[in-house]
Amino acid sequence: MLELVDATKTYIQGRRTVNAVRGVSLSIRSGEFVSIMGPSGSGKSTLMHLMGALDTPTGGRAVFQGQDLQTLSDRQRSLLRRDRIGFVFQAFNLLPTLTAAENVALPLLLGGISRRVALDRGRDCLDRVNMGHRSDHFPDEMSGGEMQRVAVARALVADPEAVLCDEPTGNLDTTTSREILSLLAKLPEPGKRAVIMVTHDPTAGSYGTRIVKIRDGLIESDEPVVRP
């Protein structure tokens, strides 16, 4: 489903060259929940951005469902992100002037789906994350955990093939974090959807089925999670 082939990513910061990712090869199958872990500055978020078509490699390839992402135009990558990949970030990124249902429906509305159909699907996704009772509420009327559930619903509304999460529990307390992680762990579907989560928290990482550890832009280890 998602693959990096000898991928590199280099940034120029003033006179300094930063090698954020240095020749990483990684393959992720549908049905997997992969936790990408590493210290700050290790390259884990850059890795996710390459897999999610938010950025392109300096060298090597990033492949989504057999399609080399570098062969796509900026518009094609934008449409792929909108229609086939869901994103959940540490900052919930909800629009304050939209209700929960409208926030969730936004990717569909941008894709030209009618408002009635988009909102119906948005409410269905809110029900899926136990937020149906908040459909008509605005973000400033919700707790952090509730806003993140809305963000998860928004990531699911287009029925994506991959859901990418960047520190999704970074702004949440311990109890709420467990609730969100349990929700994310239910999203992968064999033959349909993978979940990739970037985190520095070992407890969060343990919710995955596989842990990839990265350090200094290189994969340090790649192991399945063994549960008792």
Image: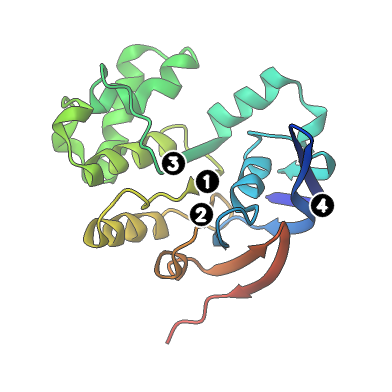
Between the residue at mark 3 and the residue at mark 1, the CA separation in whole angstroms equals 8 Å
Q: Residues within 10 Å of mark 4 (few under 14, many from 20)?
A: some
- Disc 4, SS: strand
Image-based side of 99 in relation to 79, left or right: left
Residue identifier under label 1: 164
**Mark before the other along the chain sequence, 3 or 1:** 3
The x and y percentages for residue 3 are: 73, 51
Q: Is residue 66 visible?
A: no
Task: In the rendered structure, find residue 105 and report the number of the disc placed on it.
Answer: none
Q: Is residue 180 above or below residue 13?
A: below
Residue identifier under label 4: 5
The x and y percentages for residue 207 are: 43, 67
Please report the residue visible at 51 percent of the width from the left and 81 percent of the height from the top.
226
Residues at circles 2 and 1 in contact by the CB criterion of under 8 Å: yes
Residues at circles 4 and 2 in contact by the CB criterion of under 8 Å: no
Between the residue at mark 2 and the residue at mark 1, the CA separation in whole angstroms equals 6 Å
Work out whether residue 127 or residue 68 is closer to the camera in this orientation and state it: 68
Work out whether residue 223 or residue 65 is closer to the camera in this orientation and state it: 223
- Residue type of the residue flagged with mark 2: Met
- Disc 3, SS: strand
- Residue type of the residue flagged with mark 1: Leu
Task: In the rendered structure, find residue 197 and report the number of the disc placed on it.
Answer: 2
Q: Residues within 10 Å of mark 2 (few under 14, many from 20)?
A: many
Between the residue at mark 4 and the residue at mark 2, the CA separation in whole angstroms equals 19 Å
- Disc 1, SS: strand
- Residue type of the residue flagged with mark 3: Phe
Residues at circles 3 and 1 in contact by the CB criterion of under 8 Å: no
